[in-house]
């Protein structure tokens, strides 16, 4: 399977899982959404904000190099990521809308990503000020790894709050697999 097809499949998984988990969270009362989790982030709202931060900063790095047909103008409607602790919205309905828009941008990027794009190198500055050069494939993989990592933490928190978030298995969630 080509990297580009694999990333498209991961984009669909990402989009479907975010929608599934967001629906679970939208059904929760505000006191649970804001309850201290004693975990990596203080509450469920902070988890969602951080996942969006990671997506926006990584996609912005790719857009600045016009990879996968992304352009910086595609980010005009999004907040500018500055810090891993950014809070874009304090209320989940607004975050849900932003999450959906970012997922659509990720899918647009993955739909237009080519094998040649995957082999290109991009150089960017981290939030700590370090200059890094990485293959586009590695940056793209990190978008999905970052989300998966923090969704895993979020599902642990949701489990502790007795929330059934459903199946998360890739072959079930994206039953069509890489044949997309």
Image (cartoon, rainbow, N blue to C red):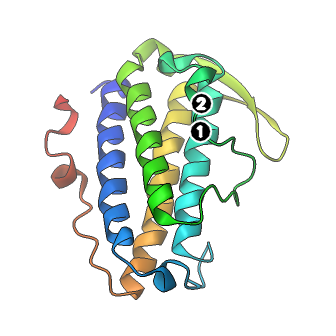
**Drawn side of residue 57 relative to residue 33, left or right:** right
Element on which disc 2 rests: helix
The quarter of the picture where residue 61 lies is top right
180 or 105, nearer to the observer: 105
How would you rate the neighbour count of disc 1 (Cα within 10 Å): few for under 14, some for 14-19, many for 20 or more? few
Residue at which label 2 appears = 75
**Drawn side of residue 156 relative to residue 23, left or right:** right
**Drawn side of residue 80 relative to residue 137, left or right:** right
How would you rate the neighbour count of disc 2 (Cα within 10 Å): few for under 14, some for 14-19, many for 20 or more? some
Q: Position of residue 110 (x, y in %)?
A: 39, 28
Residue at the limit of the structure toward the right, as seen here: 129
Give the label on residue 28, or none.
Answer: none
- The structure residue drawn at horizontal position 62% and vertical position 77%, both measured from the top left corner, is 42
The vertical placement of 10 against 62, above or below, is: below
The quarter of the picture where residue 168 lies is bottom left
The quarter of the picture where residue 88 lies is bottom right
- The structure residue drawn at horizontal position 62% and vertical position 72%, both measured from the top left corner, is 41
Element on which disc 1 rests: loop
Disc 1 and disc 2 in contact, CB within 8 angstroms? yes
60 or 6, nearer to the observer: 60
The vertical placement of 134 against 117, above or below, is: below
Give the label on residue 78, or none.
Answer: 1
Classify the position of the C terminus by image quarter: top left
Q: Position of residue 87 (x, y in %)?
A: 66, 59
Total marks in image: 2
The vertical placement of 176 against 123, above or below, is: below
- The structure residue drawn at horizontal position 63% and vertical position 31%, both measured from the top left corner, is 60
Q: Position of residue 34 (x, y in %)?
A: 55, 80
Q: Position of residue 115 (x, y in %)?
A: 41, 16
**Drawn side of residue 165 relative to residue 152, left or right:** left
Classify the position of the N terminus by image quarter: top left
State how far apart marks 1 and 2 are (Cα): 5 Å
């Amino acid at each position: 399977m080509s990297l580009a097809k694999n990333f498209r499949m991961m984009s669909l998984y990402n989009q479907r899982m975010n929608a599934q988990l967001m629906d679970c969270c939208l059904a929760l009362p505000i006191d649970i959404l804001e309850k201290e989790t004693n975990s990596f982030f203080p509450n469920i709202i902070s988890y969602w904000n951080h996942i969006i931060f990671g997506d926006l900063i990584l996609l912005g790095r790719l857009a600045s190099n016009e990879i996968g047909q992304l352009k910086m103008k595609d980010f005009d409607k999004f907040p500018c990521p500055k810090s891993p602790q950014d809070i874009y919205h304090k209320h989940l309905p607004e975050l849900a809308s932003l999450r959906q828009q970012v997922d659509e941008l990720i899918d647009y990027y993955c739909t237009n990503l080519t094998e040649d794009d995957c082999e290109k190198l991009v150089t960017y500055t981290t939030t700590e000020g370090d200059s890094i050069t990485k293959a586009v494939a590695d940056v793209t993989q990190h978008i999905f790894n970052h989300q998966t990592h923090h969704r895993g933490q979020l599902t642990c928190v949701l489990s502790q709050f007795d929330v059934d978030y459903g199946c998360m298995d890739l072959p079930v969630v994206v039953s069509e697999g890489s044949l997309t």
